[in-house]
Image: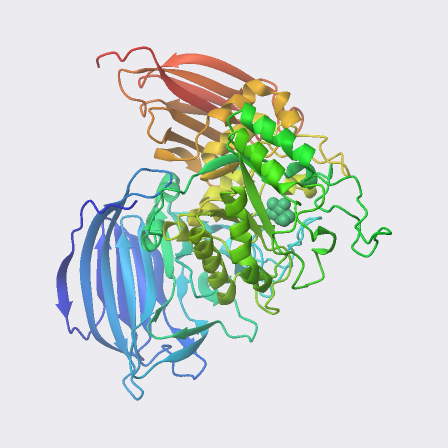
């Protein structure tokens, strides 16, 4: 529940000011707004004496050619200061400070029809958010956005961590390059990748875009509260380092159909001279609207196992039969005998979950349709309520309940969002009837309505509709192949996680992702919200039925550390029960690690190189630390001054073995125990592609400090 602790709202400048520049600032961050001589709105951002964004254009182009692209006059402006604190329903910290100075500028076309637009800037200590607000007005009702002119004119050729600006997927490997070298035309997706690539502009990158300047600044560009509007990508001008907003188009080639009053998502620029502060930023969440849900007590973050990795690695299959065109004499599908979601196998996972206090079991491939789900761009493939003959819903739901475990639902839509919307109500009623608290959705393949893209306006509204409909049925959601998040989980706290990035599964069915991948993810994909990354693979080699050379690109200890470094309220223990049973001592960390936190400290971080994060469990004085590295071995010293002074803790350290190496010897780990206090220091030795995970639990009586 959100509780307003302190609200300070001072309107200290309300004027009919008509000249620019106008400024707003907080600590080191300063925003300047100005109108150019020909009436084009511009802004610039500084961090202390350093320029973050040089004078950059703002504006919207409309289909009727009477948008806000120039010839505007300033009719007034206001500045106000806000300092409040709110409590997220779940999250990395217990409470969040929302402290900013807001500058609103009112602009108008001088000639008929005299349309009005506001640009609202919020300046935080760690960056700036701004959006366009089109007020209700006689001069404007319905309008069609053809383009957004927002620019980010960067002062130098920064290092960038980028993926292509694709209209349909974010499942790419990150490239680290100077902005002047951005070129996505060579990027072909690895084998086994199933989303459709649509990246017509070789110089377009997706957001969140992470930048590192030679002058020591770290800058992250993204957006907040993307609803009823397409996702923003950035076209990189390689010579000038100017980034220009590029909106994902709809089926008819425009960008957004809107009606005044309307507002765009916030464009966000997070900046700091310390990389950990980028990861700690709450700017994007703060720019989202508070929860829309009247009651959130039913929302439960959770860990789960599932009938899933075995299909990803080719040990079993989602589909029950080879084909819908080959039937037996009675007209039934002919089973292949490789169907993973069969009652006996699901019971095995339920038993494992119950024995290890894992609250959820995901089952994919339980429902009719998988023989024909992919590649045909068909609308009616799944109905989300018809199980295969070997998957007994009432029996399994009762069995799970008797073991205090929840079954988690899977709704693959195969991109047919229209079909899903028609079935949402019955599908969620079915979940309610059989006690499924949470659903994983999926949008593999091309979208229906045909011509729409995963990241366009239509789908952005679809994802919000799904979150709303799920909430009405007290269902939490994990959306795969959705648009990448922009902090909307604040508004829909039942939207626990999304995929929208290159998850651990790529190690199962493709060339995988190199060891630096997980050190980049928090600075990019995760800036907008949690990811269902599916960590926890223990059998790191020799798991693929078809490609024995495949391996996970981390050590086992690093798989544990990911539960802390990649924040999500929904975390899978993705490997097979038998692979966990071979390492139950290491699995203990997965059993223990929470998915909801009161506090988080980023102790060390550098994009592409390393991250060390420690978090305090919700409502407990227990801390969990994750430390990861890229392909380089590192020593990571950790001061334990986050622990309560005067209290003794048992630290259980899950570290890489002395001979561990992600490539040669990934499963080498060692577990040691040590009594520590807030005055202790640990030095973690991370192997190439390695990591360390540590739990700290208080022992004995509290010593007076
Ligand atoms: C892709 C998802 O990311 C994966 O988790 C899922 O198993 C398949 N689609 C099938 O829906
Ligand atoms: Ca690196």
For the point 24% across and 66% down, the residue is: 104
> Residue 414, image x and y in percent?
64, 56
Outermost residue toward the right in this view? 329
Q: In which quarter of the view is residue 553 placed? A: top right
Q: Along the line of sight, which residue is nearer the eye, 606 or 99?
A: 99
Q: Along the line of sight, which residue is nearer the eye, 498 or 49?
A: 498
Outermost residue toward the bottom in this view? 112
For the point 46% across and 17% down, the residue is: 652
Give the colouring mode of the picture.
Answer: rainbow
Q: Determine whether, in the image, residue 455 is placed left or right of residue 5.
A: right
For the point 66% across and 25% down, the residue is: 578
The relative height of residue 533 versus residue 249 in the rendered view (above or below) is above
The relative height of residue 650 versus residue 84 in the rendered view (above or below) is above
> Residue 373, image x and y in percent?
69, 55
> Residue 369, image x and y in percent?
69, 53
Q: Determine whether, in the image, residue 288 is placed left or right of residue 562.
A: left
For the point 66% across and 52% down, the residue is: 189
Q: Determine whether, in the image, residue 693 is placed left or right of residue 189.
A: left
Q: Determine whether, in the image, residue 149 is placed left or right of residue 51.
A: right
Residue 498 visible at all: no
Residue 520 visible at all: yes
């Amino acid at each position: 529940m959100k509780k307003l602790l302190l609200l300070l709202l001072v309107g200290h400048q309300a004027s009919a000011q008509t000249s620019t520049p106008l400024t707003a600032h907080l600590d080191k961050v300063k925003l300047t707004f100005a109108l150019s001589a020909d009436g084009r709105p511009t802004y610039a951002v500084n961090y202390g004496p350093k320029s973050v964004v040089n004078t950059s254009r703002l504006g919207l182009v409309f289909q009727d050619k009477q948008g806000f692209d120039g010839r505007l006059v300033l009719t007034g402006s206001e500045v106000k200061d806000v300092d409040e604190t709110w409590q997220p329903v779940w999250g990395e910290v217990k409470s969040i400070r929302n402290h900013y100075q807001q500058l609103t500028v009112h602009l108008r076309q001088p000639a008929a029809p005299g349309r009005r637009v506001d640009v609202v800037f919020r300046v935080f200590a760690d960056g700036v958010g701004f959006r366009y607000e089109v007020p209700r007005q006689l001069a404007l009702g319905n309008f069609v956005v053809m383009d957004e002119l927002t620019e980010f004119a960067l002062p130098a050729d920064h290092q960038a961590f980028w993926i292509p600006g694709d209209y349909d997927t974010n499942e790419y490997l990150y490239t680290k390059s100077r902005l002047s070298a951005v070129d996505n035309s060579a990027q072909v997706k690895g084998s086994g990748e199933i989303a459709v690539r649509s990246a017509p502009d070789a110089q377009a990158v997706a957001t969140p875009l992470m930048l590192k300047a030679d002058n020591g600044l770290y800058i992250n560009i993204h957006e907040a509260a993307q609803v009823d509007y397409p996702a923003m990508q950035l076209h990189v001008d390689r010579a000038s380092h100017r980034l220009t907003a590029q909106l994902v188009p709809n089926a008819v080639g425009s960008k957004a159909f809107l009606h005044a009053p309307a507002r765009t998502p916030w464009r966000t620029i997070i900046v700091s001279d310390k990389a950990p502060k980028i990861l700690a930023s709450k700017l994007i969440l703060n720019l989202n609207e508070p929860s829309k849900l009247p009651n959130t007590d039913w929302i439960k973050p959770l860990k789960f196992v599932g009938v899933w990795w075995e299909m990803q690695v080719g040990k079993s299959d989602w589909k029950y039969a080879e084909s819908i065109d080959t039937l037996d004499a009675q007209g039934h599908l002919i089973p292949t005998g490789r169907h993973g979601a069969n009652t006996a196998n699901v019971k095995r996972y339920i038993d494992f979950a119950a024995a290890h206090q894992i609250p959820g079991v995901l089952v994919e491939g339980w429902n009719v349709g998988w023989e024909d789900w992919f590649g045909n761009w068909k609308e009616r493939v799944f109905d989300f309520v018809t199980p295969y003959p070997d998957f007994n819903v009432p029996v399994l739901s009762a069995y799970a309940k008797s073991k205090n475990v929840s079954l988690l639902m899977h709704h693959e839509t195969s991109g047919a969002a229209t079909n899903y919307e028609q079935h949402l109500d019955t599908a969620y009623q079915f979940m309610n009837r059989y006690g499924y608290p949470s659903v994983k959705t999926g949008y593999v393949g091309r979208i229906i309505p045909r011509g729409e893209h995963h990241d366009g306006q239509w789908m952005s509204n679809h994802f919000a509709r799904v979150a709303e409909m799920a909430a009405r049925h007290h269902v939490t959601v994990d959306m795969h192949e959705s648009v990448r998040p922009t902090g909307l989980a604040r508004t829909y706290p039942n939207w626990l996680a999304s995929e929208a990035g290159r998850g651990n599964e790529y190690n199962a069915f493709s060339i995988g992702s190199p060891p630096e991948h997980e050190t980049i993810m928090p600075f990019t994909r995760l800036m907008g919200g949690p990811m269902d990354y599916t960590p926890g693979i223990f059998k790191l080699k020799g798991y693929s039925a078809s490609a024995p050379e495949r391996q996970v690109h981390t050590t086992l200890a690093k798989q544990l550390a990911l539960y802390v470094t990649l924040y999500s309220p929904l975390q899978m223990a993705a490997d097979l029960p038998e692979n966990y049973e071979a390492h139950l001592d290491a699995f203990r960390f997965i059993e223990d690690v929470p998915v909801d936190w009161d506090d988080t400290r980023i102790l060390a971080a550098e994009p592409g190189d390393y991250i060390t994060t420690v978090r305090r469990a919700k409502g407990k004085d227990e801390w969990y630390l994750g430390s990861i590295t890229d392909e380089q071995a590192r020593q990571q010293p950790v001061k334990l001054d986050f622990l309560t002074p005067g209290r003794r803790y048992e630290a259980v350290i899950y570290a890489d073995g002395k001979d561990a190496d992600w490539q040669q010897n990934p499963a080498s780990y060692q577990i040691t125990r040590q009594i520590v206090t807030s005055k202790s220091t640990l030095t973690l030795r991370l192997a190439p592609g390695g990591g360390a995970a540590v739990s700290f639990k208080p022992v004995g009586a509290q010593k007076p400090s």
